[in-house]
Image (cartoon, grey):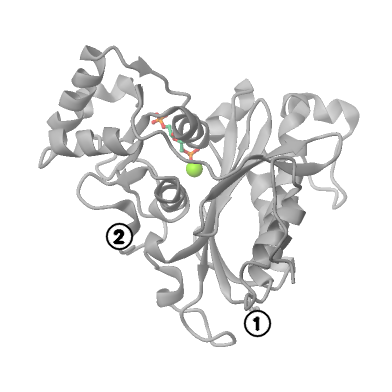
């Protein structure tokens, strides 16, 4: 009986997962293993991102990987790393990835979980040494294990996620995730090769004074967005936009703020992807007491209709998102 055990800042991710598992005595432990697999892939990608600056001179070191493959772009490498980690464990039956056109059916008879993942988001930032991230959603498949994967297994609304998280490869590397019982953040200690609990029970500030949007696209915004951003300026809010969703979201989650990627002329449904970008962050926001909407309904309520579908995204501190909604109603 582990019920008396507690965790605190400094607890390793492995131990934390173990302790959490004991809170759910009937859990099979497969989700826990899946989270460990993801953490391992994150460590590998962390190692690669730290070397990214050396990539161009990699040839000078004669660097090829064990398979003798040529140096590849980091987002491709990250995809391979996560695919391997997710397929080898046996818990996963299907994967949706930003890097793959169609669903990867792992033909894994016992796998109960479906994963949607953006292995390396913000990839335009890699070459310039700016934070990037991994975003993942975990669903339980709807049809019985062993039967062929169906649309029903893949096209689940965000509301049905059993876990979601992100890895931020920033000034330090962090893993932040939820299994629907609050949000916890772990910081990676490189020399020990361990994630340690650093941000237990993250709660987003109710309100904030940071807004994050690509303001260069202002002329393409609908009036609701224009009016809301004008109000942010009239209140002297701080404009902060990294252009790396995970980093922008993470900052706003901790400090209080709103991130907006509205529909534009070029991208009438916004730029971000519902399945492997918006949903995971919306679930985390929800668990941290923040909000996420597409301007009309909560992100988590959207019934997906295609694998790579886009959605406008307005996410952040509850009061800011509510204010945005009331100003922009009918005008996004
Ligand atoms: P990507 O999946 O191609 O990397 O694009 C997603 C990124 C987000 O991280 C970021 O918030 C957004 O694109 C920035 O877009 P823009 O350059 O249009 O402002
Ligand atoms: Mg992306």
Does residue 137 appear in the picture of this structure? no
Residue furthest left as drawn? 330
**x 68%, y 68%: residue:** 22
Is residue 183 placed above or below 35 in the rendered structure?
Answer: above
Does residue 198 appear in the picture of this structure? yes
Q: Which residue is mark 2?
A: 301
The one of 185 and 154 positioned closer to us in this rendering? 185
Q: Is residue 236 left or right of residue 5?
A: left
Q: In this rendering, which labeled residue sits more in front, label 1 or label 2?
A: 2
Which image quarter is the C terminus in? top left
**x 71%, y 65%: residue:** 33
Tell me which label, 1 or 2, sits earlier in the chain.
1
Q: Secondary structure at mark 1?
A: loop
Which image quarter is the N terminus in? bottom right
Alpha carbon separation for disc pair 1 and 2: 29 Å
Is residue 33 placed above or below 46 in the rendered structure?
Answer: below
For ligand 1, give the image quadrant. top left
**How many neighbours does mark 1 have within 10 angstroms: few (below 14), some (14-19), or many (20 or more)?**
some
**x 65%, y 38%: residue:** 174
Is residue 114 placed above or below 7 in the rendered structure?
Answer: below
Q: Is residue 128 left or right of residue 322?
A: right
**x 29%, y 24%: residue:** 217
Quadrant in the picture for residue 65:
top right
From the top left corner, tell me how far across and down residue 216 is, in percent: 32, 20
Q: Which residue is mark 1?
A: 110
Q: Are marks 1 and 2 in contact (CB under 8 Å)?
A: no
Residue furthest front as drawn? 4
From the top left corner, tell me how far across and down residue 293 is, in percent: 29, 46
The one of 306 and 162 positioned closer to us in this rendering? 162
**How many neighbours does mark 2 have within 10 angstroms: few (below 14), some (14-19), or many (20 or more)?**
some
């Amino acid at each position: 009986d582990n019920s008396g055990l507690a965790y605190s800042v400094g607890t390793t991710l492995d131990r934390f997962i173990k302790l959490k598992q004991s809170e759910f005595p009937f859990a099979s432990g497969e989700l826990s293993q899946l989270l460990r697999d993801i953490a391992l892939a994150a460590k590998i990608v962390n190692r690669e991102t730290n070397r990214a600056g050396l990539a161009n001179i990699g040839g000078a070191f004669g660097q090829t990987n064990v398979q003798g493959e040529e140096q590849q772009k980091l987002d491709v490498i990250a995809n391979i790393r996560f695919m391997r980690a997710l397929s080898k464990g046996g818990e996963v039956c299907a994967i949706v990835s930003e890097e793959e056109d169609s669903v990867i059916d792992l033909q894994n008879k016992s796998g109960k979980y479906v994963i949607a993942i953006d292995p390396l988001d913000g990839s335009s930032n890699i070459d310039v040494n700016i934070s990037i991230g991994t975003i993942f959603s975990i669903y339980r498949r709807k049809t019985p294990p062993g039967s062929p994967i169906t649309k029903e297994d893949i096209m689940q609304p965000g509301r049905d996620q059993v876990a979601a998280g992100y890895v931020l490869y920033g000034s330090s590397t962090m893993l932040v995730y939820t299994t629907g019982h609050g949000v916890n953040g772990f910081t990676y200690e490189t020399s020990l090769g361990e994630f340690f609990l650093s941000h237990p029970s993250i709660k987003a500030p109710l309100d904030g004074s940071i807004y994050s949007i690509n303001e260069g696209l202002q002329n393409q915004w609908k009036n609701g967005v224009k009016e809301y951003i004008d109000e942010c300026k009239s209140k002297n809010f701080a404009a902060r936009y990294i252009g790396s969703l995970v980093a922008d979201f993470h900052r706003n989650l901790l400090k209080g703020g709103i991130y907006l990627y509205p529909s534009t002329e070029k991208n009438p449904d916004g730029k971000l992807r519902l399945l492997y970008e918006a949903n995971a962050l919306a679930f985390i926001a929800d668990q941290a007491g923040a909000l996420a909407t597409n301007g009309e309904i909560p992100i988590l309520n959207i019934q997906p209709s295609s694998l790579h579908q886009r959605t406008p995204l307005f996410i952040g501190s509850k009061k800011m998102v509510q204010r945005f909604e009331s100003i922009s109603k009918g005008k996004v």
